[in-house]
Image: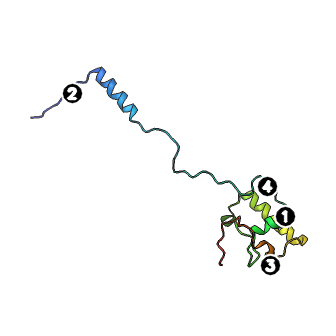
């Protein structure tokens, strides 16, 4: 013996259930955990090869190497501008090649670098 269950729905009950199911749909909203985009430190500032104090913030005090983007936090365009300005300052003699000027060692740090004390 096979039992069949027949459920008859009234049209008003179907409409009421469909309205409830529409209100239970997920709400479209922005991700609340998304971090705000970080702005480049130098965006809006003109990078000049004669501004040695600014450029010295982006070189290592021990080796004289230019820090990369992962350390400086600069955008690609400004990182290239800083690199070109540092190289130009080296060529024109505004900055030393091998080490950082000692008068700039106590400047506040722009880059996210941990120096050994």
Q: Is residue 64 above or below residue 33?
A: below
Marks 1 and 3, how far apart at CA: 18 Å
Is the residue marked by circle 3 packed among few (<14), some (14-19), or many (20+) residues within 10 Å?
Answer: some
Q: Nearer the viewer, mark 3 or mark 2?
A: 3
Is tag 4's residue or tag 2's residue first in the polypeptide sequence?
2
- Using residue 27 as the reference point, say whether residue 83 is left or right of it: right
Q: How is the image coloured?
A: rainbow
Element type at marker 4?
A: loop
Identity of the residue drawn at 68% across and 54% down: 39
Q: Where is residue 96? Give x, y as percent.
A: 84, 75
Element type at marker 3?
A: loop
List the residue tagged with mark 4: 45
Is tag 3's residue or tag 2's residue first in the polypeptide sequence?
2
Disc on res. 111:
none
Is tag 1's residue or tag 3's residue first in the polypeptide sequence?
1
Marks 3 and 2, how far apart at CA: 86 Å
Q: What is the quadrant of the C terminus in the image?
A: bottom right
List the residue tagged with mark 1: 51
Is tag 4's residue or tag 1's residue first in the polypeptide sequence?
4
Is there CB contact under 8 Å for labels 1 and 3?
A: no
Marks 4 and 2, how far apart at CA: 73 Å
Is there CB contact under 8 Å for labels 4 and 1?
A: no
Q: Nearer the viewer, mark 2 or mark 1?
A: 1
Element type at marker 1?
A: loop
List the residue tagged with mark 3: 98
Q: Where is residue 98? Give x, y as percent.
A: 80, 78
């Amino acid at each position: 013996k096979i039992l069949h269950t027949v459920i008859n729905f009234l049209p008003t009950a179907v409409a009421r259930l469909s309205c409830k199911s529409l209100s239970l749909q997920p709400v479209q909203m922005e991700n609340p955990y998304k971090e705000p985009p970080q702005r480049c430190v130098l965006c809006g500032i003109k990078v000049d090869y004669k501004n040695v104090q600014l450029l010295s913030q982006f070189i290592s005090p021990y080796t004289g190497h230019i820090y990369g983007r992962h350390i400086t936090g600069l955008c690609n365009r400004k990182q290239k501008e800083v690199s070109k300005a540092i190289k130009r300052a080296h060529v024109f003699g505004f900055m030393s090649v091998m080490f950082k000027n000692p008068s700039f060692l106590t400047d506040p740090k722009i880059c996210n670098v941990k120096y050994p004390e």
